Image (tube, grey):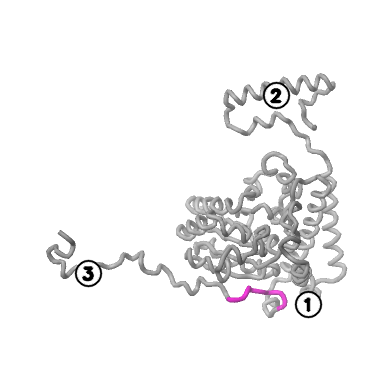
Amino acid sequence: MTVQELPGAAAYRPTPPPAWKPLTDPAPLLPDPEPYRVLGTDAAADADPELLRRLYTELVRGRRYNTQATALTKQGRLAVYPSSTGQEACEIAAALVLEERDWLFPSYRDTLAAVARGLDPVEALTLLRGDRHTGYDPREHRIAPLCTPLATQLPHAVGLAHAARLKGDDVVALAMVGDGGTSEGDFHEALNFAAVWKAPVVFLVQNNGFAISVPLAKQTAAPSLAHKAVGYGMPGRLVDGNDAAAVHQVLAEAVQRARSGGGPTLVEAITYRMDAHTNADDATRYRGDSEVEAWRAHDPVQLMERELTGHGLLDDDGIEEARTAAERMAAGLRERMNADPVLDPMDLFTHVYAEQTTQLREQAARLRVELDAENEQHGTDDGGAGR
């Protein structure tokens, strides 16, 4: 017997379940057609002068940090460094917009954001010099470990934010990712869960044009990455990623929305990676010098400096003061990074398991015998450390 043959079948009118209907109006979720800007517009008049000056100081410091870290790779003091030169406005704004209780989830390129949030510059580079662990205590600084696999930090940010809300903690997580990371499954999973749970998390996509050598046009056919937000049921915002004031304002609004229970926001910052992907990359193979030079005219440090000097908020003394402070930071970083770290080979076995397995104990014992023999041969007593 079919459904149509059942008694009363003529009156049977199946209706779709509520889930078939739109859950929300998509129009308010769509980003503006052009990236939001503050510098050089009427909106700059409403910006806090103190905030603008602080952003400028941090931008100058950040630019010097990038150039010094890049130099350290050429000197063999760093194994690799993914420079964020050209993207400093995104890095600084992401760090400054958060409260102390909030969490930052950086990618591998976001060492500058971690430093701007207060992390020791040397600790921020520890992972990239090949030392053990991440170089800092994530809980102490509320900064998740620098994430080398693409986009895996995004679900972690959602999980932490959701857990914080369940516990009643007033915490927001800000997760940073590049345009290449939006092609990963972790990006989809994170945004989907965040929207369904209304998790207090903000996603900042730094669209610098390339996923190593792959241009954005070969990754997506979407109008913008911010447009992807509507598919998950969250707002998408498009902002000029080289305008530090605009990025800070857009992120501040997104953080406030998340903290007040409004759920997540996807922010796409349009920026540009001035340097190569890392020191191991030859960027000339996939982009021309003319393209790079065109973006130099939209340099985030110069944009902020012109805005401040044009409105009488910054003079030559202020510029020199910011540059001098940046040089002091670079000199300290250079001096400390030039000191060889003291390493203990026995640490190889310390953090593998809470309780060492039989195999690990045997391996550790064999290594200890070898180190003791070597120390006896060379007349040292440092357990192999320092080499």
Q: Which amino acid type is shown beneath numbered disc 3?
A: Arg
In what quadrant of the picture does the N terminus appear? bottom left
Circle nearer the N terminus (1, 3): 3
Circle nearer the N terminus (3, 2): 3
For the stretch drawn in magenta, what is the main secondary structure?
loop
Say which element carries label 2: helix
Q: Which amino acid type is shown beneath numbered disc 1?
A: His
Q: Residue at x 58, y 51 (%)?
A: 153
Of 175 and 262, nearer the camera is 175
Q: Check disc 2 and report the residue beneath it.
A: 367
Say which element carries label 1: loop
Q: Check disc 1 and report the residue beneath it.
A: 311
Q: Position of residue 106 (x, y in %)?
A: 64, 53
Q: Which amino acid type is shown beneath numbered disc 2?
A: Leu
Q: Position of residue 354 (x, y in %)?
A: 58, 31
Residue 13's disc number: 3
**Quarter where residue 324 is shown:** bottom right
As measured in the structure, the alpha-carbon distance from the residue carrying label 3 to the one carrying label 2 is: 76 Å
